[in-house]
Image (cartoon, rainbow, N blue to C red):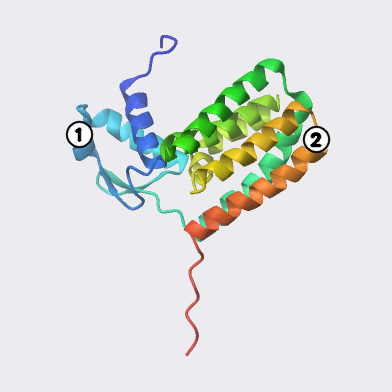
Amino acid sequence: MEPGFASESERVTERLRNEILDGTRVPGSKLVERDLAAEMGVSRVPVRDALRALGNEGLVTPRPRSWSVVREFTASDVADLNEVRTAFEGLTFRLAAQRRTREGLTRLREVLDTELRAARAGDAVSARRAAADFHEVVTSLSANELLGELERTLRSRMRWLLGQHDDLEAMAAEHELLYEAIVDRDVERVERLVLAHLATGTSEAVRRHPAEETASAG
């Protein structure tokens, strides 16, 4: 395959992934091969490939007879993701502060500026995309290939989790504080800020996906 060339299956996968993560296709909505193929002007084969890929990424739930549904993340799913995120980001942010490069900081600043502009403009989709990009760039700054592999495996579900916030400017402001601490190589400050940032993210996700109340006995 030529560099920069995306197959039809990859293009369909990317479009559906973005529509799910951006909230265009809401949780529980049907994804029927025949209907999607007609909508996108492609055959059913790339749609089938895309649904299989997105199932492996944890964004859709397959159903029998050539259709799927957009995954409905439960409170338990959110708790699991937050536990993994807490362990993962505690390490990646600390390593990023220790190992960041000038080139890496430039990329991180560009992503942060995109998030800040979008947040101030009230562009929720662009702000949330940039917020997730910020975390991915931090992982690259950690300069740990295994962490990079883990991030790629979990990417779609983590991007979903990182989009579960409504106060766009507050999230961007937390990212700016983290960026400044990484620039200063201030590992202790980074660790403090990460804990606060994780608490904010957990609170926002839990607010959107509260645990179901147990019915009282009798």
Q: Taking 113 as reference, is 183 left or right?
A: right
Residue 26 circle label: none
Residue 128 position in % (x across, y down): 48, 38
126 or 120: which is nearer to us?
120
Task: Name the amino acid, label 1.
Answer: Glu
> Is residue 144 visible to us here?
no
User: What residue is pinned by disc 2?
Assistant: 187
Residue 37 picture location, percent across and down = 21, 33
Q: CA distance from mark 1 to mark 2?
A: 49 Å
User: Which residue occupies 57% across, 38% down?
Assistant: 172
| Residue toward you, 106 or 40 | 106
Q: Secondary structure at mark 1?
A: helix
Q: Residue at x 74, y 26 (%)?
A: 183
Please determine whether, in this image, residue 125 is positioned above or below residue 6: below
Amino acid type, label 2: Val
Q: Give the image location of residue 26, x and y in percent.
A: 34, 48
Name the residue: 39% across, 13% down: 5
Identity of the residue drawn at 68% across and 25% down: 141
Which mark identifies residue 39? 1
Mark positioned earlier in the residue sequence (1 or 2): 1
Q: Percent x, y for residue 202?
A: 59, 53
